[in-house]
Image (cartoon, helix red, strand yellow):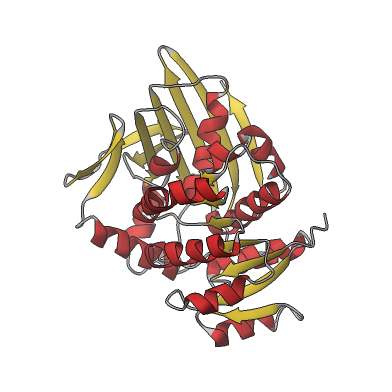
Amino acid sequence: MKSGHTVTVFGAYGHTGRFVVAELLNRGFVPVLSGRDADKLHALAASHPGVDVRPAAVDDPAALDRALVGADAVINCAGPFAATAAPVIEAALRARIPYVDVAAEIEANLDTFAHFAQRATAAGAVVIPAMAFFGGLGDLLVTAAMGDWTTADEAHVAYGLSGWHPTAGTRTAGAVSRERRDGRRVVYSDGRLEYRDDAPATLKWTFPEPMGIRSVIGEFTMADVVTVPSHLAIPEVRTYMTVEAARDLSAPDTPAPTAVDGHGRSDQTFLVDVLVRSGGEERRAVVTGQDIYAVSAPLAVEAVHHVLTGRTRTVGVASAGAIFDAPEFLRALSPHISFGLRP
């Protein structure tokens, strides 16, 4: 597929940003490298001759505008998104181009919906937050599992990670979120977000084979509690994380991911198991793949491709499940993930 569309990548030299740039090039897009550190941008550009470099900082609107000149879309990969999302969305609205980000920060995603929903809808603009492993993928899976249901009683998203070597960006984003919550944890229950001081429970989750029964942290809340309720009438949305991965994330000495293949992916594997309940019925969806950071790149790039080719259901600020045909979108990711609905 030769797109020819130009896409600015803000935060291009970050861990996920590099995967996004590579995915854009692989799919025939023309990436523009942007972010605040000019030296890192030029170092990345040296690996991709001919790629345009346009340094910009979030506190410099004129530079952000220059970074988006001639672009058909922008993908924001620069965290913490509490600081970067709003300025880059503003620039995208001024440029009249779609905005996609890979934010896993619950509060940053809430801010995007709260502050830009009306303006983006009025402008006929497309703003897609959390178009990544956390937030976007879970939302697509819940939406696909729902099928023809218009409401459900509960949605459960269980993350079966073989381990989790967090990037520096993940640690920084986590620190920002904890500060905004005053150290509390957040859950989505009875149709609203609740902040709690107690510790989450550890319980058992039966994943599909070969993973099987695993210990998980209950109410290990991720961005799905923002994306799923943004368009689906489900009052209880819970997310879970395998104990081993949660332990890796919390340990201060867990190293960053290490590449094990030619694509730069780590050896981390994942299985995401989704269960939705309505009355006495249950429906499920599952996806497997490798490296949660690497898979965020095809998610974000496929989102841009869908938007630029007119395969969308709405405008404004919208989550993945709201704006795309979820089963079709997930099948489009087949080179990167294995997706299926299950009993």
At which x and y percent is residue 178? 26, 59
Above or below — where is 230 with respect to 335? above
Q: Nearer the viewer, residue 128 or 134?
A: 128
Above or below — where is 155 with respect to 104? above
Q: Quadrant of residue 27?
A: bottom right
Q: Quadrant of residue 48?
A: bottom right
Does residue 209 appear in this view?
Answer: no
Q: Nearer the viewer, residue 319 or 340?
A: 319
**Which residue is at 58% across, 25% downward?**
342
At which x and y percent is residue 132? 53, 52
Q: Is residue 112 left or right of residue 66?
A: left
**Which residue is at 54% across, 60% downward?**
93
Kindly give the residue lying farthest to the front in the view shown: 122
Q: Quadrant of residue 279?
A: top left
At which x and y percent is residue 135? 47, 46
Quadrant in which the C terminus appears: top right
Kindly give the residue lying farthest to the bottom in the view shown: 39
Q: Is residue 39 left or right of residue 186?
A: right
Count of all numbered marks drawn on residues in the image? 0
Q: Nearer the viewer, residue 105 or 89?
A: 89
Quadrant in which the N terminus appears: bottom right
At which x and y percent is residue 281? 46, 14
**Which residue is at 57% across, 47% downward?**
124
Kindly give the residue lying farthest to the top in the view shown: 280
Does residue 151 appear in this view?
Answer: yes
Above or below — where is 171 with respect to 49? above
